[in-house]
Amino acid sequence: MDIDRHLSVTKRRKNVEKKLGISLPHIASFSLDETQASTRHCENMIGVTQVPLGLVGPLKISTKKYFVPLATTEGALVASVNRGCKAITQSGGTKTDINSVGATRGPVFYIPNLDEGKRFEKFLYDYQKKIKEIAQSTSTHLILKKVLTHRVGQYQYIRFVYDTKDAMGLNMVTIATDKVVKYLEEKTHLSCITLSGNYCVDKKPSWLNFIEGRGTKVWAEVLLPESVIKETLKTTAQKIYDVWLSKCMIGSVVSGSMGNNAQFANILGALFLATGQDIAHISECSLGITTTEVRGKDLYISVYLPDVMVGTVGGGTQLATQKEALEIMGIFGGKDGKNSQLFAKILAATVLAGEISLLASLSVASLSSAHQCLARGVIK
């Protein structure tokens, strides 16, 4: 879908509706159920903050094409990602892969000495079946997958890992873990200092999440032919590679960056906002690596995101506009985890599109002129 800045919003919407074969009534009226929002999503609610919503695509993933909604106030972002989507689709589409890790909650217990620490760890191991039963009694949509522990001095950290199906699931895992903690305190006579001791690790970038993964690990890759690089991206494979090496690899090392990528957070922020995700998770979800390799005159490029926390049910996904944004991609609702996993794949493919376009733009020094044109209202 090419960007036409001369069209009115209404006409552009009609074009989108025609392409998708659906109507977008809620997006048009900026509707929001005030009762639902004020009782479930926001306390002391005084109004609504509106953010422009754009659409990119078609984005081909395997054999299917998707249109992806992005909410942003940054001019040039939608146009750039859209160009990346075009390049991917022209190249035959992206391949994706996922590994469902699970949502985590990590309480910390006070352990007075080493002997008590060993006793506590033994109890966790011996009674893991009972602990699993207690956790899963709090929700029929929850499975306790595994328990990790780490002891430091007088502190015993526990990382409970849950399958939360199509929900992002932090409310579920918090309630489940709280019930398990009460059981552990009763049986071991040791005290939990806090339900969340940063061993989760929730809403913070961390090497533990990078290595272990959290939520969903997801990969996306594409081989860009020379013709697409030249005609759509206006550059060469070698130029993109040179920017990637100096920026994403060496530049990230020099700066001590936790994540070797060009702009994961940019795309994640826009997609999270559009679809009712917990925006604070961008801080951890933007961890990840972009890799490239010149193959003849073509370019292989991939992204890896080890910590993707998204859901297609619950939370902000129930709001009208956010629900419709998920429906545009065909992934609203669900109960077996397939929709949230597909969401993770679409997310990774969209991130890949953003990386492709930005690296291409930087390789021919067009970043500044693009922002000057698109972010300052200069229509050409």
Image (cartoon, rainbow, N blue to C red):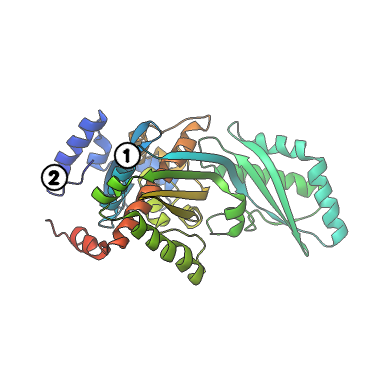
Amino acid carrying label 1: it is Thr
Is the C-beta separation of discs 1 and 2 under 8 Å? Answer: no
Residue 142 visible from this viewpoint: yes
Q: Amino acid at mark 2?
A: Ser
Determine the secondary structure under disc 1: helix
Tag of residue 8: 2
Can you say which quadrant of the picture contains the C terminus? bottom left
Q: How far from the left and from the top, in percent, is residue 190?
A: 79, 54
Where does residue 156 sit, x and y in percent of width and height? 75, 57
Mark carried by residue 211? none
Instruction: Decide if residue 95 is on the left or right side of residue 126.
Output: left
Within 10 angstroms of label 2, few (less than 14), some, or many (20 or more) residues? few
In the image: residue 3, left or right of residue 319: left
Identify the residue at horizontal 78%, vertical 45% (top origin).
124
Q: Residue at x 48, y 58 (%)?
A: 283
Q: Nearer the viewer, mark 1 or mark 2?
A: 1
Indicate the position of residue 55 as horizontal and vertical percent values. Answer: 28, 43
Which residue, as the protein is rendered here, is positioned at the far bottom? 254
* Tag of residue 89: 1
Quarter holding residue 342:
top left
- Element type at mark 2: loop
